[in-house]
Amino acid sequence: MSNNRRKQSEQGKSRRSIGHPYTSARLTGVWLVLGLASLGLLWRLCWLQIVRAPFLQSKAQAQQSTTKRPFVPRRTIVDRSDNQIAVDTPSYSLYVYPAKFSEVLVGKGLPKNGKQVKLTSLEVAQRLAPILQCSIRELVEKFNRPQSRIFIQSQLQENLKNRLDSLKLEGLETAQGEREYTRFYPQNNAFSEVVGYLDWEHKAQAGVELSQSLLLERNLVRYRLTKTGGNNGSILPDRVTSDYLHSDDLKLKLTVDLRLQRAAREALTQKMQEWNAQRGTVIVMDADTGAIRALVVMPTYDPNHYARDVENYGKLVGKRRAPLLLQNAAVSDLYEPGSTFKPIAVAIALENRAIVPTSQFYDEGSIKVGTYTIRNSDKKGNGKIDVAQILQHSSNVGMVKMMQRLKPNTYYDWLQRIGLGQKSGIDLPLEGQGEVRSRREFVASPIYPANAAFGQGFSLTPIQLVRLIGSIANGGKLVTPYVVEGLFDSEGVRKDNPVRPEPSQIFAPKNAQAVLEMMETVVNKGSGEKAKIAGYRIAGKTGTSQKAGMGGYTQDDKKVTSFVGILPVDRQRHYVVFAAIDEPKGKEKAFGSNVAAPIVKSVMDSLISIEGIAPSNPSEIEAKAALMEKQNENRTKTDSTDKVDKATKSPVKSR
């Protein structure tokens, strides 16, 4: 048995060593698959490494990089002396964790590290309300929300954040996001009419913030940065480009002056309170260039808290009229200029040779024009007067007779030539266009040219009137008013090139000078005496215009009192100072002479000091100073005598 098994085993080995056909085919198949797989792998490697390499490389770079546009604050706005008017500052958002409300008490008898005491929502609200300027009830309602982390308020200034931090309360968090900046106005309401404001979304809504947005918003580009892998990869600091957080140092400089702006606002506010007036405007313009040195409207708002101020104003005038607080009346509100337009009408008459400076007219106190009767404001006649005296007495009758020497068509052509019914072109938004009757209406009825002779029957804005009076001051040129000087770097080098319209010569210099000298007599001898300043030659014109209502000019108390002055008459550089008070109410009748002229005088006093304007007649100033000194001495002697008399007459009381 054992021999047979040995033989069978040897025969099996012999057969396996020779190979079976089935086994050989299987091995061949394996090798064939391996060979094809190798060829496929080799082909795939070639495809990826050679053919598809550029595409895969770009895809990898895309996964490892991100594109960001950094948030850069708006450019700063400054006045002509580089005082900051508007600046972007970091702002913060306040979050609270009511479950963590507590504070650490330190002091005698307490642990070294202090004692932590839990606080209620009411206690925390009582401490936060004065800082956030909101109600305690409102805060408590927010604290009672179900979230663990509750948003309270955004756009908190640095000073408010510091006040919150000083409370040292647990459960408060002040955080700044990447784009959290607030527009801050350091001068509060000093320049609100000029600068405007940004709303809570950081969007410009008024003033140069709106009209100069392209200059104030920096030109930003997108940067491609490298980041770590994953969807939430972090930026690699060694791969950030050096100019990623770079921003220019340019600032927008204005023509207005902080000192003059404050002086004008103070003078206007004082008179408005004295006369219980609704609104008021003051404008100071360099007549030779058109640069606005001051522009004030009252009442006004603080651009840092415009919403609060509008709400408070609404409580006084009603919600419908509340938005008027944000309106710049100096460039948007239309009014009839009244007698302040008379110098322009005189210049038009001189240009057309309808009169000469020595022309005379007889003023009876009233004149019939068609079916209408026009009277002087005082309802008195002035007799035989020349052109200068017409302006001194503000004679409506004299003006009507003067302008009747012009054909209505010619007069209308000149009203269009000087820009009535058009905008002044000032670089502030929402300027009013002015209104004037059509030529057909104006020519058809003689009452319309007659009314236009003394500033009624058409409307313009205060800035448009200042522009017109500027042409009398500067030798007959119509300039374009502006408030933006330009973009400057930190070294004071100008970086922009603004294109301003060239002044247009509308009046001959000799005619403008003749009217200027006539206006000087208004201050020296006429209705503008309250604008007189010792030692300085000042020209001016008063204006008191009734406001038209549904029934015409029927309400005597509905009027606008105004005065426009020119300082100095005898220098190469001239300034136009305008003041208007809307609906003044007082014990005496309100006129431009007693309401607006004193404002102009006060502003001119400040202008003289700020600009260093030399007096025309220094001896007059010395004489006035000597007189005041003598009056003070006499007053001192009188006071001393009174005290002696009182001491002599006082009874001696016994003890």
Image (cartoon, grey):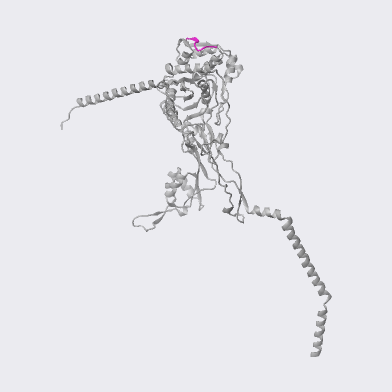
Q: Nearer the viewer, residue 470 or 166?
A: 470
Q: Is residue 639 above or below residue 46?
A: above
Q: x and y percent of residue 2 in the render?
A: 79, 90
Q: Is residue 130 above or below residue 583?
A: below
Number of numbered discs visible in the structure rendering: 0
Q: x and y percent of residue 144 in the render?
A: 48, 50
Report the predominant secondary structure element of the magenta stretch: loop
Q: Residue 447 sits in which quadrant?
A: top right
Q: x and y percent of residue 485 in the render?
A: 53, 32
In this picture, which residue range is highlighted in magenta?
354-364
Quadrant location of the N terminus in the rendered image: bottom right
Q: x and y percent of residue 344 in the render?
A: 52, 18
Q: Nearer the viewer, residue 137 or 491?
A: 491
Q: Residue furthest left?
A: 655
Q: Residue at 66% across / 55% down in the picture? A: 60
Magenta includes 359? yes
Q: Is residue 77 above or below residue 554?
A: below
Q: Nearer the viewer, residue 598 or 588?
A: 598
Q: Residue furthest right?
A: 21
Quadrant location of the C terminus in the rendered image: top left
Q: Residue at 57% across / 53% down in the picture? A: 237
Please indicate whether residue 484 sits to the left or right of residue 127 in the image.
right
In the rendered image, is residue 549 in sight?
no
Q: Is residue 35 above or below residue 509?
A: below
In the rendered image, is residue 223 in sight?
yes
Magenta includes 3? no
